[in-house]
Amino acid sequence: MSNYNDDSLALHTDAYQINMTETYWHDDMHNRKAVFELYFRNLPFGNGYGVFAGLERIIEYIKGFCFTESDIDYLREAVGYEEEFLDYLKTIRFTGTIRSMREGELVFGNEPILQVESTLAEAQLIETALLNIVNYQTLIATKASRIKQVVGEEKVLEFGSRRAQEMDAAIWGTRAAFIAGFDATSNVRAGKKFGIPVSGTHAHSMIQVYKSDYVAMKKYAESCVRRKNKVFIPLVDTYDVLRSGVPAAIKVAKEFKGEVDFKGIRLDGGDMAYLSKKTREMLDKAGFHSTQIVASSDLDEQTILSLKAQGAKIDVWGIGTKLITSFDQPALGAVYKIVAIEDDHGDMVDTIKISSNPEKVTTPGEKRVYRIINKKNNKSEGDYITLKNEEPQKEESLKMFHPTHTFISKFVTDFEARELLTDIFVDGELVYENPDILEIQKFVADNLTVLWEEYRRTLNPEEYPVDLSQDCWDNKMQIIKEIKEEIKDYTGQ
Ligand SMILES: Nc1ncnc2c1ncn2[C@@H]1O[C@H](COP(=O)(O)OP(=O)(O)OP(=O)(O)O)[C@@H](O)[C@H]1O
Ligand SMILES: O=P(O)(O)OC[C@H]1O[C@H](OP(=O)(O)OP(=O)(O)O)[C@H](O)[C@@H]1O
Ligand SMILES: O=C(O)c1cccnc1
């Protein structure tokens, strides 16, 4: 460890952001107004929608954004930036405007999730942290929502902390999972920090310590008696589920009847379809009809679907590794692109990034995103991206067309154009209060009712429309044309 205090997040950025800021500062460009937009291109896991998470931490980060003395000392020593530039860095706070989707909003490819309008320097310096936060939390919230889709009304618990990519991932991943519909977490700190319900059983080690299912469960029951909630959920697969684990659990539960709350057992291995059915029979036969079977062991939406198809008698699902590490897709690939910059006369000019890959060509200009809700059925017709001054709600009939295959189009009437980007910071001031985590969780559930089932299924969902307005599309085409005309060919010089 170095001798510097790790007392701020301002250096939680890529070195090139500070290098660019230095260049802008030298050229007196640093205070020019710029607009950047954050979005991902493709939905992860082949899912039909994403669930936006990360705003809570972004608000915390932006509020505290400043270079501390130790940050400056470190930059002086490590890079040797000139003193005047370091003096300038010391003065930087976030003074701009951030518009963002609300946490728990459903998000799709190629639409701005978050927009930063501020000085070029500020917007650039915060890029890495914003992407870092949104990329992970949105990925986990989306994975959790897929799991929730297949679990349905049954309970689902987050068990991932031990397998997460370090502590921040465990904590913020847990929060993202809860937003997306998980019921509780095993991580006690996440419970304390965010108010997420905490739940826990016990591990195989406790059975091994006492070398006997019965003895260990009895000792455990004795301590459950002393706890306020009295919950007793023994783990039954350490030695032999059907011959030892379940019979021991039943024996102890009978001995402690009225003293503990025998909620059920946990099964963590073996053929969980077969074992859960047999366990259910044994619990029912013993009169414990209302007990629940908790299952864990490398579960994800595929294994849950398969276990359900096999008629497994599982009531509660504990999910760790596959959720918290986003096992089948490690990155969301969200990007942060400049879309407008102030020119020498103080006017904002739209800007584009051209690529030979059409998917990577940016859409210039500061934009707004609307969810077009059909008032007849309260279902979404798709998302509609406009330039900032357009007012789609005023249209009698809205033309929505595919941004690449433009011949695919439809007209929508009798609609509500619900604006999705909300002011979070205005001129550096926080103007938004993030709702309570339970409200955010409900917001996700409500949002999902607006999507047709075709977009919600986990396997091969339909592609949800994310369309550009005519003006936004024309603007993009016009700028591509201008750039192509203006571009200088330096090869012959
Ligand atoms: N009936 C089933 N159908 C489909 N998948 C199952 C079924 N039962 C268990 N699984 C899944 O199969 C995998 C089992 O892997 P594995 O044999 O390595 O684990 P295990 O049986 O839990 O072993 P251990 O208890 O030694 O860890 C897990 O992902 C589990 O969720
Ligand atoms: O399987 P996951 O989805 O990642 O869920 C978390 C796992 O963590 C525990 O096992 P671990 O092997 O760490 O310890 P144990 O001996 O207590 O089962 C638990 O029993 C689950 O299997
Ligand atoms: O409480 C549990 O059963 C639990 C907690 C963490 C990981 N696996 C299981």
Image: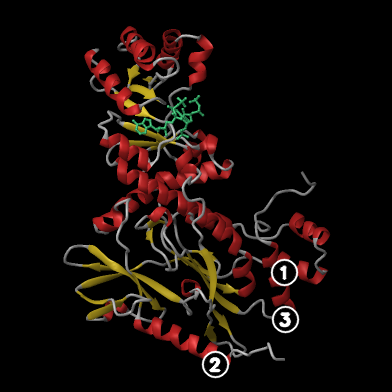
Please name the residue that numbered disc 2 is placed on. 485
Q: Please identify, in this view, whether the residue under mark 1 or under mark 3 is nearer the observer.
A: 1
Please name the residue that numbered disc 1 is placed on. 19
Determine the image quadrant of residue 123: bottom right
Amino acid type, residue under disc 1 in the picture: Asn
Amino acid type, residue under disc 2 in the picture: Glu
Amino acid type, residue under disc 3 in the picture: Asp
From the viewer's perspective, is residue 209 above or below residue 127? above
150 to the left or right of 87: left
Q: How far apart are the two marked residues, 2 and 1, measured between alpha carbons? A: 31 Å
Return the x and y of residue 83 as percentages of the image width and height: 82, 68
Contact, mark 2 vs mark 3 (Cβ under 8 Å): no
162 to the left or right of 178: right
Residue at 50 percent across and 33 percent down: it is 188
Please give the label number shown on residue 27. 3
Q: Sort mark 3 into few (<14), some (14-19) or many (20+) by Cα contacts within 10 Å.
A: few
User: For the N terminus, which image quadrant?
Assistant: top right
Mark 1 or mark 3: which comes first in sequence?
Answer: 1
Q: Residue furthest left?
A: 376
Q: Please identify, in this view, whether the residue under mark 2 or under mark 3 is nearer the observer.
A: 2
Residue at 44 percent across and 35 percent down: it is 298
68 to the left or right of 310: right
From the viewer's perspective, is residue 63 above or below residue 299? below
Q: Say which element carries label 1.
A: helix
Please give the label number shown on residue 294. none
Q: Sort mark 1 into few (<14), some (14-19) or many (20+) by Cα contacts within 10 Å.
A: some
